[in-house]
Structures are given as structure tokens and as C-alpha cells.
């Protein structure tokens, strides 16, 4: 017998899937117990020269849905992305009992429950290791290895482009625009970098991570999101002064029956394991009841690394198929509420340009106190009649902190709120 695969999409990831399938052919056959054969490859435009790919040109088609519906197709790999028509391809395949492997975080985060339902209806496997942190084995460890434990928090860097930009800003003192240009030149950032720099990509990953970690439904609309476009060289320098670095964080946490998921830049202490994750690398730090703290680290993007995750899933679903195993979708039994961002406990780093006059510090401190926010440290540096006041708070709700900053900005003695950033991890 031969297992037949339909590949939908042949871009950065899809073309590497083809190469890796070819290179690993013998081993894959041994690992699965039967050969895998590509039944067809759906592309957007036919007639393009794809001579560099080790594949019979007659396999290319522009009719993705027709390929999915072919009777001889057992497994569908979707590496196009976006909501439609990917949703139609995937649900059609699953309902017809065909296993699906996808890297499509956007769709999983928007409508994961419909996909899971289609998998249940069709009795088919749905795997998506590549959707979060590319090559890093993460979703199956959450879905399988840690299934006996209770996860409290997942704090991670899951977007390579923004981690690269902030790393460069830290290393060279460059501003955001300059670092973004560099990221584009190196091919990290896409032609339209909005999904990365505005946090949409990480927010989709946060929803998927939180759903798996806490066995509940979290969609992308439940995730609080802030991009990194406002991060300045001054923020990076201020972080360095207090022994911190600025990282693009994705934090999912559970407290009793409530979960929160958020994506934003934050300062973390240099000693924190995530602080040394630089360049385009990703890392995911999991805090579990019995396992303690675990860190997963590696390449979160790129054609070949992502194809590695796709092929790992391929072997898993092919072996399940051969064994006649009944697919078990991820468990979502815990119906947890979503904590609004305003109620989330965080700490702030606030940098104010103020008049260097007696009473200013007391005035600023009184605004913090009036909102029940306790200051942890205050640092002042002078510049003639002007001074910079940097305050780091103890934890308070995000709403308390943002109201405090709003009030501070209205004080006559405050010339400008130069920067506001959350602080995570112990300082
Ligand atoms: N590139 C990465 O590092 C990476 C990492 C993890 C996950 N992903 C995900 O993998 C998926 C693919 O990403 P990519 O980087 O390979 O994108 P890509 O743009 O390089 O490739 C997508 C391909 O799909 C093709 N396509 C578009 N519409 C189609 C249609 N109707 N039929 C057939 N083909 C069609 C496009 O022509 C393109 O070649 C996305 O969901 C992405 O989020 C990518
Ligand atoms: N654009 C994404 C690709 C991987 O999902 C990143 O920069 O991490
Ligand atoms: Na992964």
C-alpha cells in the first residue's frame, strides 16, 4: 500500500516540504511502514518554472479543492495560509475522513473549533505543529507529554521578525524603522510586515497556545494585542539601565477558572531565560505544577524548519492511519472565562520628562498613590531645569496603571510621558 498526499501551496514552506519528502523518502517509508507519495500539488498559478523541485511537473494543479476531493488522497497538507479558501479545503478534507496537517495559525486562531468539529465528524486527524514556533516541538508536548500536569503559564517569544528587530535595536541602538529595514533586507519581515510588527501573528499563536495549555477555547479576539512599532531607542536604553531587555512577549496564563492571553513588548530582566533569546529565534517558557519550568527553544520560522514540523506531523498521522487509530482531538473540556486586559495584573515602567523643581516628585507620587499603585523604584536624572523621572511600579491592574499614566500626563509639571512599558519577570 501507498499513502497519498495532497500538498496545497508550494511557497516558502510548501517547496521545502517537497524537498524534505524527497530527501527523507527511504526513512519516512521505514518510519511509517509504507511509502508516502505526492498525489498532487495545488498552486495558485500554473505554468511557472518549478524545475528546481524534485517532483514530476504533471503533479501541479491550480484546482486545490478538486485535489482535496480526489478519492485516492489520504492526507492533505495545507501551507497556503489565510482564512478562505483554506477553511473550505480543510473542512472538506476532514469531513471526508482525510487527515489534515496545516501551518495556518490565522485560521486555527479564528475558527479552530469548527476545524476540530470537522475532524470529529470525519474521524480524521488534524495536526498543526508548524503553526506555532515553527520547527520547535511545542504543540505535541503540550497536547501529549504535559497532559498529566497542570500548566499555569506560558510566556514566550513566538514571532521571529519582531524578536530580530528588538534584538538589533538593543545591540546597535538603532531605531525601529532602521531595524525593520534590516529585517526586510534579510528576508525576515514580509513585504507587508503588519502581521508581525502589529502583533497579529503572535496573537494568533497566543490563542492556539492558550487553548492547548489550558484545555479551553481561546480565539484571537480574546487576545490583547499591542505591536512593537512604538518601541523607541530610549525605551531600550531605559530598560538597559535597570538591567532589562525589551522583548516581544506572548503571555498566556491561568488563574483558577480564568485565563488571559496577551501580546505586547515588555521589559524583562537580563537574567530571565527569555532575555538571551535573540535574533529571529523563538522560545517558549512553560510553567507547570509538577514539571516546574520548561523552556523550548529554536527556529520559529523559515521554510526548512517549518517543513520539519510538517513532516513530523505527517509521520504521526500516517502511523495513526496505518494503526487504524481513532483520532483524538485536543481536549477542550475546561470552559474558562477570559480575563479582560484591564483586570490583568502587570507592572509598568514609566518614564516622564518633568520640570526639575521642588515638589514634582511628590506630585507624581501622589498620582500613583491616588490610584492605589505602589511604586517600586523611582530614579531621577537631571538636565538643567528639566529632569527625567523613571518609575517602576509594583503589580496593579492594567486599568489602574493606564489611568495613572493618563493622569500623570495631565500634570503641569510633566512635560511629556516619554515611555510606558510593561515589566515582566522578577527584577
Ligand atoms: N514561512 C514561515 O516561516 C512559516 C512558519 C510557520 C508557519 N507558516 C505558515 O505556513 C503557511 C504558508 O506560509 P509560506 O511562508 O509558505 O507562504 P508563501 O506565501 O511563501 O506560500 C503560500 C503559497 O500559497 C500559494 N497559494 C495562494 N493561493 C493559492 C490557491 N488558491 N491554491 C494554491 N496555492 C495558493 C501562493 O501562491 C504561495 O506560493 C501560512 O499559513 C503561514 O502562516 C509559515
Ligand atoms: N512571520 C513569522 C513567521 C513564523 O510564523 C515570524 O516572524 O515569526
Ligand atoms: Na512548532
Image (tube, grey):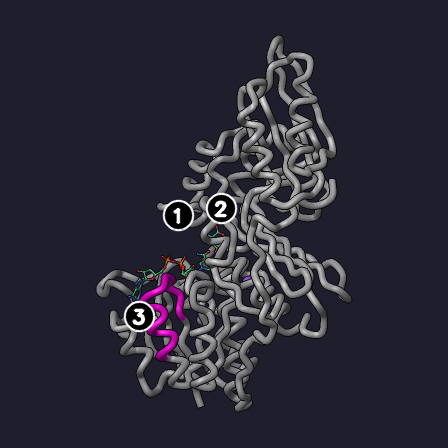
| Residue found farthest to the front | 370
Which residue occupies 66% across, 41% down?
A: 347
Whether tag 1 and tag 2 are in contact, CB under 8 A, the answer is: yes
- Depicted 354 relative to depicted 367: above or below: above
Label 2: few (<14), some or many (≥20) within 10 Å?
A: many
* Residues at marks 3 and 2, CA–CA distance in whole angstroms: 28 Å
* Residue 42: numbered disc: 3
Q: Quadrant of residue 139?
A: bottom right
Nearest the viewer among 268 and 415 is 415
> Sequence-wise, which precedes: disc 1 or disc 2?
2
Q: Quadrant of residue 141?
A: bottom right
Q: Circle 1 is placed at which residue position? A: 190
Q: Is residue 321 visible?
A: yes
Which residue occupies 72% across, 63% down?
A: 288
Task: Tell me: is circle 2 under 8 Å from ligand 2.
Answer: yes
- Depicted 364 relative to depicted 197: above or below: above
Picture coordinates of residue 65, whole percent (x, y): 29, 75
Q: Is residue 275 magenta?
A: no
* Residues at marks 1 and 3, CA–CA distance in whole angstroms: 22 Å
Picture coordinates of residue 213, whole percent (x, y): 62, 66
Give left or right: position of 187 versus 215.
left
Task: Tell me: is circle 1 under 8 Å from ligand 2.
Answer: yes
Task: Tell me: is circle 3 under 8 Å from ligand 1.
Answer: yes
* Residue 161: numbered disc: 2
The C terminus - image quarter: top right
Helix, strand or loop for disc 2: helix
Picture coordinates of residue 108, whole percent (x, y): 45, 66
The magenta stretch is 78-92
Amino acid at each position: 500500500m501507498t499513502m497519498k498526499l495532497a500538498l496545497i501551496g508550494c511557497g516558502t514552506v510548501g517547496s521545502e516540504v517537497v524537498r524534505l519528502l524527497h530527501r527523507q523518502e527511504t526513512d519516512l517509508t521505514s518510519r511509517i511502514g509504507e511509502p508516502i507519495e505526492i498525489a498532487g500539488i495545488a498552486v495558485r498559478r500554473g505554468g511557472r518554472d518549478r524545475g528546481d523541485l524534485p517532483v514530476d511537473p504533471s503533479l501541479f494543479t491550480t484546482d486545490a479543492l478538486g485535489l482535496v476531493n480526489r478519492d485516492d488522497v489520504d492526507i492533505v497538507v495545507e501551507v497556503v495560509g489565510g482564512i478562505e479558501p483554506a477553511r473550505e479545503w480543510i473542512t472538506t478534507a476532514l469531513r471526508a475522513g482525510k487527515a489534515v496537517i496545516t501551518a495556518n495559525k490565522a485560521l486555527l486562531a479564528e475558527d479552530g473549533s469548527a476545524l476540530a468539529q470537522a475532524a470529529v465528524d470525519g474521524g480524521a486527524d488534524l495536526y498543526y505543529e508548524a503553526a506555532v514556533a515553527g520547527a520547535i516541538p511545542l504543540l505535541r508536548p503540550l497536547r501529549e507529554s504535559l497532559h498529566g500536569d497542570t500548566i499555569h503559564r506560558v510566556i514566550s517569544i513566538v514571532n521571529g521578525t519582531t524578536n530580530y528587530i528588538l534584538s538589533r535595536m538593543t545591540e546597535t541602538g538603532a531605531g525601529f524603522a532602521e531595524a525593520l529595514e534590516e529585517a526586510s533586507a534579510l528576508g525576515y519581515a514580509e513585504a507587508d510586515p503588519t502581521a508581525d510588527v502589529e502583533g497579529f501573528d503572535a496573537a494568533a499563536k497566543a490563542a492556539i497556545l492558550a487553548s492547548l495549555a489550558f484545555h479551553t477555547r481561546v480565539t484571537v479576539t480574546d487576545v490583547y494585542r499591542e505591536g512593537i512599532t512604538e518601541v523607541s531607542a530610549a525605551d531600550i536604553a531605559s530598560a538597559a539601565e535597570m538591567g532589562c531587555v525589551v522583548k516581544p512577549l506572548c503571555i498566556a496564563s491561568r488563574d483558577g477558572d480564568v485565563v488571559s492571553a496577551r501580546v505586547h513588548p515588555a521589559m524583562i530582566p537580563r537574567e530571565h531565560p527569555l532575555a538571551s533569546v535573540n535574533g529571529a529565534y523563538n522560545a517558549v517558557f512553560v510553567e507547570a505544577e509538577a514539571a516546574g519550568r520548561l523552556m523550548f527553544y529554536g527556529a520559529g520560522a523559515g521554510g526548512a524548519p517549518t517543513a520539519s514540523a510538517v513532516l513530523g506531523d505527517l509521520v504521526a498521522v500516517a502511523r495513526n492511519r496505518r494503526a487504524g487509530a481513532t483520532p483524538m482531538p485536543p481536549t477542550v473540556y475546561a470552559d474558562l472565562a477570559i480575563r479582560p486586559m484591564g483586570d490583568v495584573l502587570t507592572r509598568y515602567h514609566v518614564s516622564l520628562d518633568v520640570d526639575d523643581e521642588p515638589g514634582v516628585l511628590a506630585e507624581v507620587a501622589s498620582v500613583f498613590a491616588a490610584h492605589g499603585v505602589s511604586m517600586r523604584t523611582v530614579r531621577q536624572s537631571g538636565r538643567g531645569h528639566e529632569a527625567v523621572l523613571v518609575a517602576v511600579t509594583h503589580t496593579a491592574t492594567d486599568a489602574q496603571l493606564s489611568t495613572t499614566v493618563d493622569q500623570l500626563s495631565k500634570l503641569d509639571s510633566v512635560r511629556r510621558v516619554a515611555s510606558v512599558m510593561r515589566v515582566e519577570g522578577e527584577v
